[in-house]
Image (tube, grey):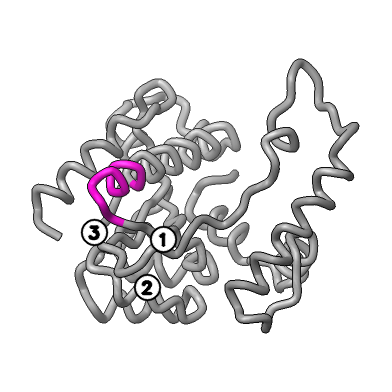
Amino acid sequence: MDKETLDIIIKCGQRAPTSNNLQAYTIIYVKDNNKKEKLAQISGGQKWVVEAPVVLLFCADLNRIKRYSNSENKDIFGTSELYTVAIIDTALAAQKSLIAAQSLGLGGVVVGGIRNDMEKVHSMFNLPDLVAPLFLLCLGYPDHDPGLKPRLSKDVIFKVDIYDTSREDELIEEYNKTMEEYYKERSNGKVQSNWSEKCKQALSKQPRQKVDDFLRSAGFFK
């Protein structure tokens, strides 16, 4: 990927909404192949971390704001509100970057598996306190069209005035059938599962309990 294309993607990411213009994130371009290999291992062997021509590390960042705001209330940086602001700012910047990349003909994969060992990633990139590595955005030109994974019906996630669940059982059942067919087709019949079962599997895995420990040690929660 040429520098001009990458600059467009990053600049578009910077135009994402940001609470109070805090811009509470930092993006690190990972060029070092050894670091890519380590990130792939931490993420559970996700090969695109190594194969993608551009790998961007998105970090929630309150450190810069603390250093330059001259805020008299130093304890505010350890609150859940500012942590939430940083998480949202980072996610919006990443999504804006991905949309920009897609508009330029690229494809992208978001990898949250680096949170399997946030302490190690933090050390690898010499991150200071109040900076948390959240996920990678791996970008490249796709060699085929993988199609779109089906999503929940709009009527499940879009409500009017109240949290209405009157049709949710019916809609989830329909979606589970759709996903069952999707997994069968994508795996040539090897995967027999649906959305509810995949959710259960994801929640049954060993939780990233060290995430809490890391965030506290990095100063995000007091």
Q: Please identify the quarter of the rendering in which residue 127 is found.
A: bottom left
Locate residue 32 relative to residue 161 in the image: left or right. Answer: left
> Is residue 63 visible in the rendered structure shown here?
no
Residue 212 screen position, x and y as percent:
62, 57
Q: Dot 2: within a 10 Å radius of its alpha carbon, few (fewer than 14), some, or many (20 or more) residues?
A: some
Q: Which mark is residue 29?
A: 3
Measured Cα–Cα span from mark 2 to mark 1: 8 Å
- In the picture, the quarter occupied by the N terminus is bottom left
Q: Dot 3: within a 10 Å radius of its alpha carbon, few (fewer than 14), some, or many (20 or more) residues?
A: few
Tell me the amino acid under the disc marked 2.
Trp
Q: Is residue 206 above or below residue 86?
A: below
Residue 36 screen position, x and y as percent:
31, 75
Q: Are marks 2 and 1 in contact (CB under 8 Å)?
A: yes
Query: Who comes first in sequence, dot 1 or dot 3?
Result: 3
Q: Say which element carries label 2.
A: helix
Q: Say which element carries label 1.
A: strand
Locate residue 74 relative to residue 37 in the image: left or right. Answer: right
Tell me the amino acid under the disc marked 3.
Tyr
Q: Is residue 24 above or below residue 140?
A: above
Residue 188 screen position, x and y as percent:
61, 81
Q: Say which element carries label 3.
A: strand
Asked whether 4 or 125 is in front, the reply is 4
Residue where numbered disc 2 is placed: 48
* Residue 100 located within the stretch drawn in magenta: yes
In the displayed orientation, state which residue is furthest to the top.
Answer: 161
- Give the dominant element type of the magenta stretch: helix, strand or loop: helix
* Residue 207 located within the stretch drawn in magenta: no
Locate residue 94 relative to residue 14 in the image: left or right. Answer: right
Residue where numbered disc 1 is placed: 109
Residue 28 screen position, x and y as percent:
27, 56
Q: Which residues fall within the magenta stretch? A: 98-106
Query: Who comes first in sequence, dot 2 or dot 3?
Result: 3
